Structures are given as C-alpha cells and as structure tokens.
Amino acid sequence: MDSASVARDMEAIRVALGEEKLSFIANSYGGRPGIDYSRLFPGRVRAMVFDGAVSPYMDRAQGQGPP
C-alpha cells in the first residue's frame, strides 16, 4: 500500500464521519500520508502537525533528497 492510497482512505474516513475538514497529527513516517493528503485534497485540510516527518522530496530509491 502506498501513501497516496492511505491518503485516499483518510479522505473516505473524513467523508464517512461527515466532517467538513480534516485535522491530522503524525510523527515519523506517518507524515508521508499526511503530505500526500494535503496535495490530493488541499481544500479539505483544517490543520496538520508533522513531528519528524520524512522529506517529501526524498528519493526512495537512493535515500537522498534533491540535488
């Protein structure tokens, strides 16, 4: 399962709960789905807190950020 799929699941949960916007707190790698959610559904974010999130620019194959 990739983080974009998890972000879509987060949106489905938000809809099922009848919430207008999502508030989300994440630590470590939990921030990756939050970053993807904010990119896929920017108008649905109320607040997000990332504690130690991985870089959204990380190259997963090489384990490095952008040049």
Image (spheres, helix red, strand yellow):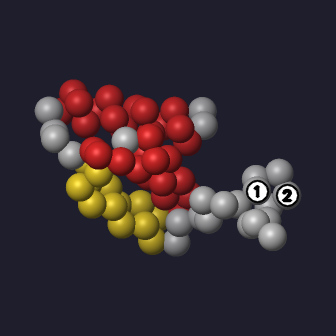
In front: 46, or 26? 46
Q: Nearer the viewer, residue 45 or 7?
A: 45
Pointer 1 local density, CA inside 10 Å: few below 14, some 14–19, many at least 20: few
Of residue 39 and residue 63, the one placed in the foreground of this image is: 39
Q: Position of residue 9 (x, y in %)?
A: 40, 32
Q: Percent from the top left, x then y, of residue 56?
A: 60, 59
Give the vertical position of 46 relative to 36 (above or below).
below
Badge 1 vs badge 2, beta-carbon distance below 8 Å:
yes
Image quadrant where one finds the N terminus: top right
Eyeballing the image, is 57 above or below 5?
below
The quadrant in which residue 65 appears is bottom right
> SS for tag 1?
loop
Estimate the x, y position of residue 46 in percent, counting from the top left: 23, 55
Q: Is residue 11 left or right of residue 39?
A: left
Q: What crowding class fits label 2: few (fewer than 14 Cα within 10 Å), some (14-19), or many (20 or more)?
A: few
The three-letter amino acid code for the residue at tag 1 is Asp
Q: Secondary structure at mark 2?
A: loop
Residue with the mark numbered 1? 59
Which mark identifies residue 25? none
Residue 18 image offset from top left, x and y in percent:
14, 33
Residue type (three-letter) at the residue carrying disc 2: Gln
Measuring 21% from the left and 46% from the top, which residue is drawn there?
Answer: 21
Residue under pointer 2: 62
